[in-house]
Image: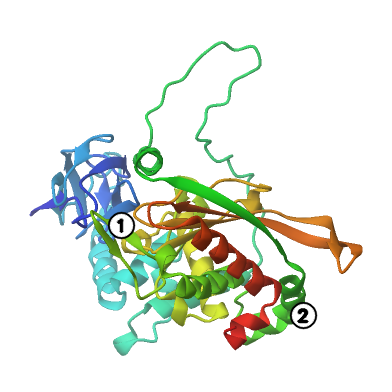
């Protein structure tokens, strides 16, 4: 039976996608829930999985082709088998024929789709896992336990891994060659939005500096206990900036607002976008209702986003919306920058590198860990006084973290 392989249903914010990679070619055998093709949108890469066991019969949309939501990508012959080598031993055929259906039936009977996919991704033989589910069914939790056991087992010496492919080509000294490559959809979309922001907003940036002494002391004192109490979640600096931003946004609603035509939309919640670097470029997943989150929940959410970004697993929903954004160029050593507002938001906070610098404190010169902060904002909506006061509020909250607890 022929099964149509179709593009995923895109949300309203995504007009179309591009066929990024076919992981199978016509004639290749595929298993149910196996990755067949990647569709790249201007936000995420969406995976298309096989609906059944069979053979890839036809590719309708080739790599680089533009596809619409639900459009036909190819066809799969369900239940078909890939052509076997002609030199197969006749004596072994009956045994193989008898064993194959039994193995397939057993695999379908005891393994859930999620567990099967996880086992394949980690090179785990499902038959080696003792199922704890109903009727001996292997659950996803069983596979996770097997993966952890595999990680803890002594590893055999491995060959040196191949170097990851670089986005930019590497040329030898003296070469006078050029290489032209198309932009990825994500890079093209980022370029488009940056130009849009600068051409449609009255964008300004105000700066300040924050003494990180108290936050660093608090983190140093409680980081081990924090990690132990919250099941391995590490206490970083970003959670303090998120919570300080949430409090400042409550005090200055215009910074948390957006412009829609001739209207100003004030948001009664704080959805904080956190810029994350990935191999595909900068992405901004959103912490929903950050005003309701604890420091541990913020750190856990950011860690999850970072892992998903590296693996290309972020969903469109996770990167849609947001009322305010925080970006941290300090992780790359930046001393100062002017971040660009992510429309339709009205402002973005830029963090930078922490540098030990001499400061005048109570008439004495002392060395303090200092960070420059930058707030870029849309002057059509936010007055200079509001922007400066907002940034000073964040500075005060970070220099005296007790204010975050006392709401002062």
- Camera-nearest residue between 270 and 78: 270
Residue depicted at 23% across the width and 35% down the height: 65
Query: Which residue was labeled with disc 1?
Result: 259
Residue 235 at least partly seen: no
Disc nearest the viewer among 1 and 2: 1
Q: Secondary structure at mark 2?
A: helix
Expressed as whole percent of the image width and height from the top left, the position of residue 200 reads 34, 42
- Camera-nearest residue between 215 and 262: 262
Expressed as whole percent of the image width and height from the top left, the position of residue 357 reads 82, 55
Query: Image check: 39 left or right of 395?
Result: left
Q: Earlier in the sequence, mark 1 or mark 2?
A: 2
In the orientation shown, which residue stands out farthest toward the right?
364
Q: Which mark is residue 221?
A: 2
Density class for disc 1 (Cα within 10 Å; few <14, some 14-19, many ≥20) is some
- Camera-nearest residue between 6 and 41: 41
Residue depicted at 54% across the width and 65% down the height: 390
Kindly indicate the quadrant of the structure image that contains residue 133: bottom left
If the image is split into quadrants, where does the N terminus sit? bottom left
Residue depicted at 52% across the width and 60% down the height: 385
Expressed as whole percent of the image width and height from the top left, the position of residue 148 reads 55, 73
- Camera-nearest residue between 7 and 217: 217
Q: Secondary structure at mark 1?
A: strand
How far apart, in angstroms, are the residues tagged by discs 1 and 2? Answer: 43 Å
Q: Are marks 1 and 2 in contact (CB under 8 Å)?
A: no
Determine whether 111 is above or below 283 in the image.
below
Q: Which mark is residue 176?
A: none
Residue depicted at 56% across the width and 79% down the height: 296
If the image is split into quadrants, where does the C terminus sit? bottom right
Query: Image check: 106 left or right of 399?
Result: left
């Amino acid at each position: 039976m022929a099964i149509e392989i179709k593009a995923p249903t895109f949300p309203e914010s995504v007009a179309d996608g591009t066929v990024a990679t076919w992981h199978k070619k016509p004639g290749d055998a595929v298993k149910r829930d196996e990755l067949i093709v990647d569709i790249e949108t201007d936000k995420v890469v969406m995976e298309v999985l096989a609906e059944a066991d069979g053979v890839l019969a036809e590719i309708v949309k080739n790599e680089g082709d533009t596809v619409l939501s639900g459009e036909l990508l190819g066809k799969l012959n369900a239940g078909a088998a890939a052509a076997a080598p002609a030199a197969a031993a006749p004596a072994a055929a009956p045994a193989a024929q008898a064993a194959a259906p039994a193995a397939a039936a057993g695999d379908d009977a005891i393994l859930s789709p999620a567990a099967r996919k996880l086992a394949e991704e980690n090179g785990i033989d499902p038959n080696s896992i003792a199922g704890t589910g109903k009727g001996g069914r292997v659950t996803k939790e069983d596979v996770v336990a097997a993966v952890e056991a595999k990680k803890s087992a002594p590893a055999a010496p491995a060959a040196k891994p191949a170097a990851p492919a670089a986005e930019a080509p590497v040329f030898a000294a003296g070469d006078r060659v050029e290489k032209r490559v198309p932009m990825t959809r994500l890079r093209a979309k980022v370029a488009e939005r940056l130009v849009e922001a600068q051409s449609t907003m009255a964008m300004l940036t105000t700066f300040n500096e924050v003494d990180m002494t108290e936050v660093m002391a608090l983190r140093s004192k409680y980081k081990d206990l924090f990690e132990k109490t919250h099941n391995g979640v590490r206490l970083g600096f970003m959670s303090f900036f998120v919570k300080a931003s949430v409090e400042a946004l409550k005090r200055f609603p215009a910074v948390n607002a957006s412009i829609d035509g001739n209207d100003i939309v004030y948001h009664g919640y704080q959805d904080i976008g956190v810029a994350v670097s990935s191999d595909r470029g900068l992405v901004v997943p959103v912490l929903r209702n950050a005003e309701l989150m604890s420091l541990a929940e913020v750190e856990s959410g950011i860690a999850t986003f970072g892992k998903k970004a590296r693996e290309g697993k972020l969903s469109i929903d996770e990167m849609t919306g947001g009322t305010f954004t925080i970006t941290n160029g300090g992780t790359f050593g930046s001393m100062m920058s002017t971040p660009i507002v992510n429309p339709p938001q009205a402002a973005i906070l830029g963090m930078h590198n922490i540098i030990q610098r001499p400061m005048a404190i109570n008439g004495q010169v002392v060395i303090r860990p200092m960070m420059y902060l930058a707030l870029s904002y849309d002057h059509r909506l936010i007055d200079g006084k509001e922007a400066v006061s907002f940034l000073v509020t964040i500075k005060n909250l970070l220099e005296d973290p007790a204010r975050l607890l006392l709401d002062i």
